Image: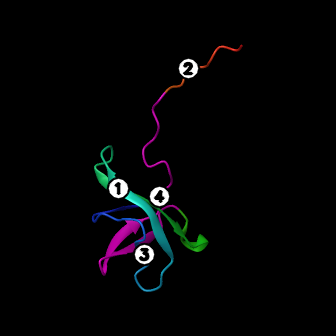
Amino acid sequence: MRWSAAQRTGAKLGARAQVGEISSGAFSPCLKKNVAMGYVKKSFGKAGTPLKVVVRGRANEATVTKMPFVPNTYFKAPTAAS
């Protein structure tokens, strides 16, 4: 999910009816944005679905996004067979 305000564990997803909850959130230095992981009802889980995240009584915009948020670019060399 992406939004403008920092989201933390326990933040509610859904402005009127709760459709999920944030399990973890932090600032991403790679994306220069806040990101979070959470659980939502199955009908709200499709990538691109807009949601509201309620923090301190204020609803912020969020969007369901596929993971990983940043593509991995590491290379793991194959190990020699023993």
Q: Is residue 41 above or below residue 34?
A: below
The residue tagged 2 is 77
Colour basis:
rainbow
Q: Amino acid at mark 2?
A: Ala
Q: Is residue 62 above or below residue 77?
A: below
Q: From the image, state whether disc 4 or disc 2 is nearer to you.
A: 2
In this image, 30 relative to 47: left or right?
A: left
Q: Which residues are magenta?
A: 47-74
Q: Nearer the N terminus, badge 4 or badge 3? A: 3
Q: Nearer the viewer, mark 4 or mark 3?
A: 3
Q: Is residue 44 positioned above or below 37 on the image? A: below
Q: Disc 4 to disc 3, how far (Cα)?
A: 17 Å
What is the spatial separation of the Cα atoms under label 4 and label 1, in whole angstroms? 15 Å
Return the mark for residue 26: 1
Identify residue type, mark 4: Thr
SS category of the residue bearing label 1? strand
Marker count (numbered): 4
Q: Residue at x 30, y 45 (%)?
A: 29
Q: Tag on residue 65?
A: 4
